[in-house]
């Protein structure tokens, strides 16, 4: 038995037009752009949370060191520490309280010294020698 071939008509060979291809490419470009923005936002947020975590550890270490030191008077000072391969700037403000044997210590950690908002901060109270 011989196979019979059907005649090729223009209806069976219909493909996509140039306009349809361009519309499909625009839709793909918009979708990829949105996906890239979403991934970028995730990366930025992850980096910010990582810095906040390190800053919290830095402030906890600083407060632990303050609690073993002996403070004699109120003062305000800056210092730098290196942790996790980064330099952190610590601002310590010691304020007298109503009790002469207790000082209030405000400790803030900054990524750069000239920043306006701290990544981490903590208030502690330390005893002073009479």
Image (cartoon, rainbow, N blue to C red):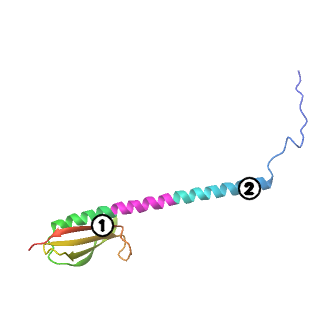
Query: Which residue is the extreme one toward the front?
Result: 98
* Quadrant of the image containing the C terminus: bottom left
Inspect the magenta stretch and tell me whether residue 42 lies in it. yes
Residue that carries the numbered disc 1 in the rendered image: 82
- Magenta-colored span: 41-54
Q: Are marks 2 and 1 in contact (CB under 8 Å)?
A: no
Left or right of residue 72, residue 124 in this image:
right
Q: Residue 20's x, y, as percent?
A: 77, 53
Mark 2 residue element: helix
Inspect the magenta stretch and tell me whether residue 22 lies in it. no
The Cα atoms of the two marked residues, 2 and 1, are separated by: 53 Å
* Quadrant of the image containing the N terminus: top right
Q: Is residue 30 above or below residue 97?
A: above
Q: Residue 118's x, y, as percent?
A: 35, 70
Q: Residues within 10 Å of mark 2 (few under 14, many from 20)?
A: few
Q: Residue 64's x, y, as percent?
A: 21, 63
Quadrant hosting residue 56: bottom left
- Mark linked to residue 68: none
Quadrant hosting residue 58: bottom left
Left or right of residue 58, residue 125 in this image:
left
Left or right of residue 68, residue 42 in this image:
right
Please tell me whether mark 2 or mark 1 is closer to you in this view.
Answer: 2
Q: Which is nearer the eye, 126 or 114?
A: 126
Residue sitting at x 66%, y 54%:
28
Residue that carries the numbered disc 2 in the rendered image: 23
Residue sitting at x 79%, y 49%:
16
Mark 1 residue element: strand
Q: Is residue 22 above or below residue 92?
A: above
- SS assignment for the magenta stretch, majority: helix
User: Quick one: label 2 or label 1, which is nearer the N terminus?
Assistant: 2
């Amino acid at each position: 038995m011989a196979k019979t071939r059907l005649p090729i008509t223009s209806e069976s060979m219909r493909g996509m037009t140039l306009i349809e291809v361009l519309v499909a490419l625009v839709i793909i470009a918009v979708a990829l752009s949105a996906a890239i923005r979403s991934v970028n936002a995730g990366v930025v947020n992850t980096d910010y949370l990582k810095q906040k975590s390190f800053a919290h550890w830095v402030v906890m270490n600083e407060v632990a060191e303050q609690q073993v030191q002996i403070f004699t008077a109120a003062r305000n000072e800056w210092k730098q520490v290196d942790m996790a391969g980064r330099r952190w700037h610590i601002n310590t403000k010691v304020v007298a309280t109503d009790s002469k044997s207790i000082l209030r210590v405000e400790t803030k950690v900054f990524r750069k010294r000239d920043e306006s908002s701290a990544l981490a901060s903590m208030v502690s109270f330390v005893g002073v020698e009479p």
